[in-house]
Amino acid sequence: MIRDLPILNELRLKFGTNGVQVEETRDGVPTIRVDRASVVPLLRFLKQDAEQPYPMLFDMTAIDERNRKTRPMEASNEFTVTYQLFSFVRNQDLRVKVALSSDDLALPSVTSVWPSANWYEREVWDMFGISFNGHPHLRRLLMPKSWEGHPLRKDHPARATEMTPFELTDEDVETEQDLLKFNPEDWGMQRKDDHIEYMFLNLGPAHTGTHGILRLVVQLAGERIVDIVPDIGFHHRAAEKMGERQTWHTYIPYTDRIDYLGGVMNELPYLLAVERLAGIRVPARAEVIRVMLAELFRIASHLVWYGTFAQDVGQLSPVFYMFTDRERIFRIIEAITGGRMHPGWFRIGGVAHDLPVGWTHLVREFLEYLPSRLSEYDDLVLRNPIFQARTKGVGRYSTQEAIDWGVTGPGLRATGFSWDFRKTQPYSGYEQFDFDVPTAVNGDCYDRGLVRVEEMRQSLRIIGQCLEYMPEGPTKADHPLATPPNKDRTLQDIETLIHHFLAVSWGPAIPAGEVMAKVEATKGCNAYYLISDGAPWPYRVRIRTPSFPHIQMVPLISKGHLLADLLAILGSVDFVLADVDR
Amino acid sequence: MKALPFIVLLLGSLLTISALLIWVERRLLGQWQERYGPNRVGPGGILQTAADVIKLLTKEDWIPPFADKTVFILAPAVVVSAVLLSFAVVPFGPSLVVADLNIGILFLLAVSSLSAYSIVLAGWASNSKYALIGGLRGAAQMFSYEVYMGLSLMGVVMLAGSFRLRDIVEAQQNLWFCIPQLLGVGIFFIAALAETHRLPFDIPEAEAELVAGYHTEYSGMKFGLFFLGEYLGIVLMSSLIVILFFGGWQGPWLPPLVWFGTKTVVVMMLFLLMRATFPRPRFDQLIAFGWTIMLPATLINLLVTAAVILMNRHDVS
């Protein structure tokens, strides 16, 4: 039982039985409620002093509980702040919740425990208006400075039709532009010191090297980077708020566009979470189809990274070769799903269709084609001495730093730490596949590249196994909540017809509860934390994306390097702005 | 005054060749990168550059309000005039030369390196941070390659015993200098890449980090002049390599001009291939490369050449 977990006893001993209350959740993640005063000491204890510590702040978010019918705690709990920790030794998550009432929305900041809490706390402030005492720069993160209200509160409108018509006058443009002006003093930066006057270079939001609308204000001494202030939010599309207005089923295409290079890979954690809530077991064939498509998209995403990374260090040709290869993947995706980058093809309880006739031929052809191309790229890029000179020893971080900052995926494995959620917490049948988890040693730009290139080869292995061992059987679960439901009996039986009609027109009503599911996505660990109120739509959708913590870390690993190195670092981190801003 | 028609003809053909070179480069890059390249305007897209020039000429002639106007206009003119002026001493054939100076090489090095000014001036006059960084990089890069560029040619001068380009070509009657000066031709080729700011030495431009470097603020035909200057530079450097190391116009059966042209085209293709192949080093790496590897290599080349020449002389006497 969760209540008897040793860590909970350890916490009860230290912080008292009343201070640590256990809450049941659907996903089986140990969840405790603590009072405000013990947040910081408790989290510090969990990170540093616990016997098997929880060194990573995996995610942090808040919930506006005011409209929730199935609220787990007393009515005075109007907002909940959630800290999601992860322990590698235990291979276990831990959720720590703090209840707040709306007349006193403040918490002590945990930035002193985890540096990565900085942006998470700013996001919670931005979205919910919960302030964090002791935070160094508590200000909006995703929304513009001029925004009124806190968007993820339940009383904030979600649709343009609920607001006054939008107008942008010339004065508004002026004001907004003024608000975007960078003022070094706001960030505790000096304009000059005894020897030198710093240059503040505004890199982005529209810049060739930032891979999207990311703004980095770089403090330069000559060409040497003194500090960087990232400004994100230009790609913010309120994906989490949308979740509260879409049915469980119609939200699927939105997830595709979170990490827009990952395609169906994004649907997977969302659907795993929904299926866990609904208690759906996905049939084996659907699971293997999902794995195959997800791995194809991993290769597609890594190919884009590979090409653009080479371009970031000035190599012009690779990107064309790699996009050509990616096009071959899209040809397979198109044959199977009908879509290309964002097929929106997985369904609650399975996938949309069975595989088309002749799919084996397409996949086999690709499996034979890519390996020789990859070894050619090794010669062209990875073994190129100039490329190595540009990337080796640049943007280095240790395993310890990576965990402190919430880095997952290839960026973590490049430091020599072999951790892949496909292996350690297998989902969708990954435990049946035979593949290796590539790692590197130094954690610099070059090693992050090495790991990704090797990952493509491993993905090919997985796809090969999918091809060889594709099980027969249905592609959607025979479950009342699988969407759209199976139709075979509807013409004989009025009850199933009614059910089918409701499930298709309103969407399924997923049972109430809280659940989180995570996958090893293309860029790191992508997780969906869903709260259902028993309605046909989610009560709260929290998307934990890998790019968010990775970008937050860029200033740390860029300091002391040259401006040209910053581009190599950005390329090696492999982020997608939509994945950062959501 | 028989020189005047020749000069006019020369200028005309140089501009045409550069325009063609741009098209050739884009088509070749397309082939190398598994795509088409421009193939719509004219047969095979050959008129693409003409269309681009018309577009550039009819664009608004924009000068940013924060720029230093005079210098801003002057900068792109410097690069084109410097390169065109350098062609004055280039012998395209035994008698096809505008000015047969007896210090041809020195004149050429002096005038062609003036084009670095255009980068520094453009970077400075634009009054924009990206352009400034690009301009400063241009200056830093110039310091590192100009030294070994000049020195790498001294071996040739020693072998030919003259600074006059025509004498150098004629001295290669029996043996092209690329054989005794193998190291020299390698070094000079690298220096020529740096001089023309082609990948992997396009550090002042470095579009990945500096948007467009020193010409970030330029548009219209002023930008076009920088572009033209770069391609004229390739033609100049390729002709120079042919003259100094590959026997210039010399060759059997065919007329001298055809030989000269063929050799130059081959070298130009090499320039283009570089761009399709290499990543860009960091500017500190380039400078370190210049001072710690290229300069010593050049000096060794110079010493060995001198020693060999002295030894041979001793045998004669």
Image (tube, helix red, strand yellow):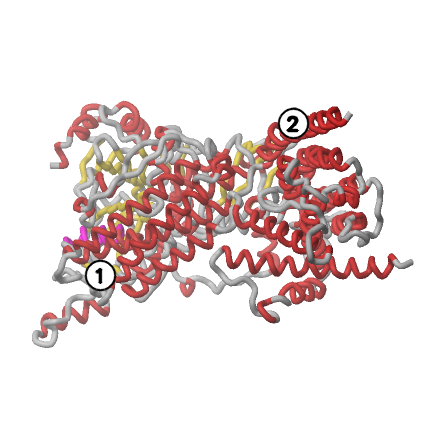
> Seen in the image, is A474 located left or right of residue A183?
left
Q: In terms of image quadrants, where is residue B49? A: bottom right
| Chain bearing mark 1 | A
- Residue A472 image position (x, y, % from top left): 13, 60
> Seen in the image, is A280 located left or right of residue A47?
left
Q: Is residue A465 above or below residue A29?
A: below
The range drawn in magenta is A269-280
Q: Is residue B18 above or below residue A76?
A: below
Q: In terms of image quadrants, where is residue B58? A: bottom right
Q: Which residue is mark 2?
A: B300
- Residue B173 image position (x, y, % from top left): 72, 44
Report if residue B114 is visible in the image: no
Q: Residue at x 91, y 58 (%)?
A: B1
Q: In terms of image quadrants, where is residue A380? A: top left
| Chain bearing mark 2 | B
Given residues B56 and B42, the one toward you in this image is: B42
> Seen in the image, is B293 located left or right of residue A471?
right
Label 2 and label 1: CA atoms lie apart by: 69 Å
Q: Residue at x 74, y 24 (%)?
A: B314
Residue A69, magenta (yes or no): no
Instruction: Please state, as top left, top right, bottom left or bottom right, where the C terminus of chain B lies in the image.
Output: top right
Circle 1 residues within 10 Å: few <14, some 14–19, many ≥20: many
Secondary structure at badge 1 equals strand
Q: Is residue A301 above or below residue A96?
A: below
Residue A278, magenta (yes or no): yes
Per the rendering, the mark at residue A351 is: 1
Circle 2 residues within 10 Å: few <14, some 14–19, many ≥20: some
